[in-house]
Image (cartoon, rainbow, N blue to C red):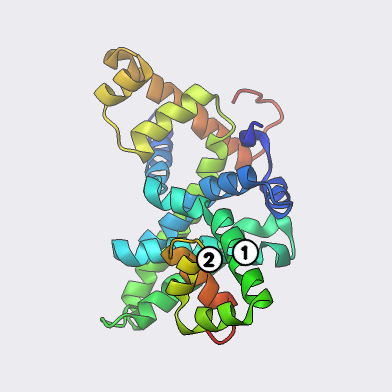
């Protein structure tokens, strides 16, 4: 099955039906989001990993009680944020959440994460080639040489391909926020 | 040109906000159904066998070995949550 074309709600329903492949897709699909929320709260690697695993454990256990399958992302976001706050409160360290300035910074980063999710959703509408090259360069921080070797492309063409794909992503992203019936190019 | 470039700079920044989680974390989370099935099996055994149930409550990790499971911390955690009195 090509999971890229399957909606979040359908993935949730397949998980509930006991499909292990659907669960793997759900974890893959939301792993960056959960990881980014933990990073936004500035958890150390060990706490971040605990929150990551605990989040998916709870998702698995409570998936049957989700009121709306379409609301999976906000539910996961809320659950992860709550687990991060619990972790910070339990830790023997400066009470980060009592510091208004620090809390403001966490809120700013969480807003950026939500915006980044919209960009990722737009990214999913691009061709597999564009998705891969943008993901490798921006998200995985790979060099032109590494990307060239992995994708069997001359390093000299990588920059122009990234630029073209980024322009397509911008169009797709803007198209999501301001639907333009005249534009069919993704 | 400048305005478009700025937009693309922002989009690039937002792409960087969502790096992949470490591969090992991902794999561990994806194994959750297997852990849940192992927990189900252990709890069924505890329900059917009072002696095993007592062992499970007294020494969860030893009981897991008796039941043929490695005491994986995720399995231990799941059982502690699901087993009243453990």
Task: Please tell me whether residue A83 is drawn above or below residue A70 in the rendered image.
Answer: below
The answer for how far apart the CA atoms under marks 1 and 2 are is: 9 Å
Task: Please tell me whether residue B78 is drawn above or below residue A91 in the rendered image.
Answer: above
Residue A70 is left or right of residue A144, and the answer is right
Q: What element carries label 2?
A: loop
Check chain identity for marks 1 and 2: say if they share one.
Answer: yes
Q: Nearer the viewer, residue B47 or B16?
A: B47
The answer to whether residue B55 of the structure is visible from this angle is yes
- The N terminus of chain B lies in quadrant: top left
Mark 1 and mark 2 in contact? Answer it, CB < 8 Å: yes
Q: Which residue is drawn at 57% across and 61% down?
A: B38
List x then y, in percent, for residue B64: 49, 68
The answer to whether residue A167 of the structure is visible from this angle is no
Which dot, 1 or 2, sits closer to the camera? 2
Q: What element carries label 1?
A: helix
- Circle 2 is placed at which residue position? B67
Residue B5 is left or right of residue A116, and the answer is left
Residue A162 is left or right of residue B58, and the answer is left
Task: Please tell me whether residue B75 is drawn above or below residue B82 in the rendered image.
Answer: above
List x then y, in percent, for residue A140: 34, 38
Q: Residue B41 carries which label?
A: 1
Furthest-bottom residue in view?
Answer: B85
Dot 1 or dot 2: first in sequence order is: 1
Alpha-carbon neighbours of circle 1 within 10 Å: few (<14), some, or many (≥20)? Answer: few
In which quadrant of the rendered view does residue A64 lie?
A: bottom right
Q: Which residue is drawn at 34% across and 67% down?
A: A47
Q: Which mark is residue A152?
A: none
In which quadrant of the rendered view does residue A185 lie?
A: top right
Q: Which residue is drawn at 68% across and 46% down?
A: A19
Chain letter, disc 2 residue: B
Q: Residue at x 36, y 37 (%)?
A: A138
């Amino acid at each position: 099955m090509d999971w890229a074309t399957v909606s979040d709600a359908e993935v949730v329903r397949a998980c509930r039906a006991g499909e292990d492949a659907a669960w793997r897709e759900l974890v893959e699909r939301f792993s960056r989001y959960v990881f980014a929320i933990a990073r936004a709260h500035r958890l150390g690697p060990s706490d971040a990993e605990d929150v990551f695993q605990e989040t998916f454990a709870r998702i698995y256990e409570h998936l049957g009680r989700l009121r709306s399958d379409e609301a999976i992302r906000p539910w996961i976001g809320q659950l992860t944020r709550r687990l991060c706050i619990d972790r910070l409160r339990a830790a023997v360290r400066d009470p980060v959440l009592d510091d208004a300035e620090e809390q403001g910074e966490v809120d700013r980063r969480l807003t950026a994460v939500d915006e980044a999710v919209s960009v990722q959703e737009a990214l999913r509408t691009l061709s597999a080639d564009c998705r891969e090259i943008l993901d490798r360069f921006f998200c995985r921080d790979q060099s032109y040489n590494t990307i060239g070797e992995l994708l069997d492309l001359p390093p000299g063409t990588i920059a122009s391909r990234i630029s073209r794909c980024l322009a397509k992503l911008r169009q797709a992203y803007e198209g999501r926020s301001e639907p333009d019936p005249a534009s069919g190019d993704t | 040109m400048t305005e478009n470039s700025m937009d693309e700079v922002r989009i690039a920044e937002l792409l960087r906000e969502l790096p992949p989680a470490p591969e090992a974390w991902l794999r561990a989370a994806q194994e959750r159904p297997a852990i849940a099935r192992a927990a189900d099996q252990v709890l069924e055994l505890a329900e059917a066998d009072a002696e095993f149930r007592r062992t499970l409550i007294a020494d969860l990790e030893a009981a897991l070995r008796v039941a043929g499971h490695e005491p994986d911390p995720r399995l231990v955690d799941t059982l502690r949550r699901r087993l009243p009195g453990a």
